[in-house]
Image: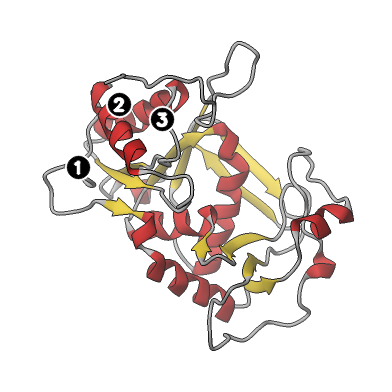
Amino acid sequence: MSEEKEKKTYRGRLAPTPSGYLHEGHARTFKVAWERAMARSGVLIFRNDDLDAMRCRQEFVDAAMDDLRGLGLNWSEGPDCGGAYGPYDQSQRTDLYICALRKLVEGGFAYPCLKSRSEIREVGLISEEGDESIFPQKFRPITNVSIPDDFPGAVNWRFRVEWGRLVSFVDQSEGLQEFRTGNDFSDFLVWRKDGVASYELATVVDDHTMAVTEIVRGEDLLVSSARQCALFDALGWSRPDFYHCKLMLDEEGMKLSKSERNLPRLFPS
């Protein structure tokens, strides 16, 4: 951690997505987040990343809090913490996300995108890791766009990356991480046409407004962290530190998924 951030109160967060029950991989990552906050006499925030209204349910919110308490974890901001803050639900913070999106558009960093997934896939560009389509430059608008009267409107908005830029950060667990825009990722969604902020934008806005100093997450989100670094930079906000944990795999070598219906509750009621 940088010397400047050491002078500040450590602020971490537990940010489950309540679209299913937590599994052992989540538990291990959240325990690391808790241990790092406690070791630094810091603050730990609880936030429900509940943007997906179709999949997120209150029963999963309640189960997550019960399971985390069953692991002996607690938090000092968020639901049922006895403090003056929280609960934090992303679904209630839309106005903040729209303000950040407006700032991106005004700065020339975001534009409306009418291209469908099939149109993007047909171009045939794939990332270096082979796990995502690279949004082609030819689909971008040539000039910056203006703010429409019905902003953000019923359209997708994408973040305009600086093509060929090296986005790097020093991970507190994995060391130096480097990603090249145009090879590892390209223009990504920051707003969906159904009126919901993307995971990338919502996370950056919340981690900034909640003054999070370190994000603890799984190593499958390393590229996502690079995208978020680009957003922090474009918005003129200081980046937090990152700590990426090794993934927990199942017997077939696949990462655990909360969408797997056969996974039991960590602490069945």
Q: What residue is disc 1 on?
A: 76
- Kindly identify which residue carries mark 3: 21
Q: Is residue 75 visible?
A: yes
Q: Quadrant of residue 191?
A: bottom right
| Vertical placement of residue 82 versus 23, above or below | below
> Label 1 to label 3, Cα distance in Å?
22 Å
Q: Is residue 239 visible?
A: no
Q: Residue shown at 58%/86% (left/top)?
A: 148
Q: Earlier in the sequence, mark 1 or mark 2?
A: 2
Q: Position of residue 85 (x, y in %)?
A: 19, 53
In the rendered image, which quarter contains the N terminus? top left
Q: CA distance from mark 3 to mark 2?
A: 9 Å
For residue 210, what is the image quadrant? Answer: bottom left
Q: Pointer 2: what residue? A: 67
Image check: 16 left or right of 177?
Answer: left
Of the two numbered discs 1 and 3 on the same chain, state the one appearing first in sequence. Answer: 3
Q: Is residue 90 above or below residue 98?
A: above
> What amino acid type should be assigned to the residue bearing mark 2?
Asp
Q: Can you say whether 209 is above or below 114 in the image?
A: above
Residue 178 horizontal/vertical position (percent) = 66, 44
Q: Residues within 10 Å of mark 1 (few under 14, many from 20)?
A: some
Say what secondary structure mark 3 lies in: loop
Seen at 22% across and 52% down, the residue is 86
- In space, the residues marked 1 and 2 are separated at their CA atoms by 17 Å
Residue 120, position in %: x, y? 80, 57
x, y percent for residue 224 = 59, 46
> Mark 3 touching mark 2, by CB under 8 A?
yes
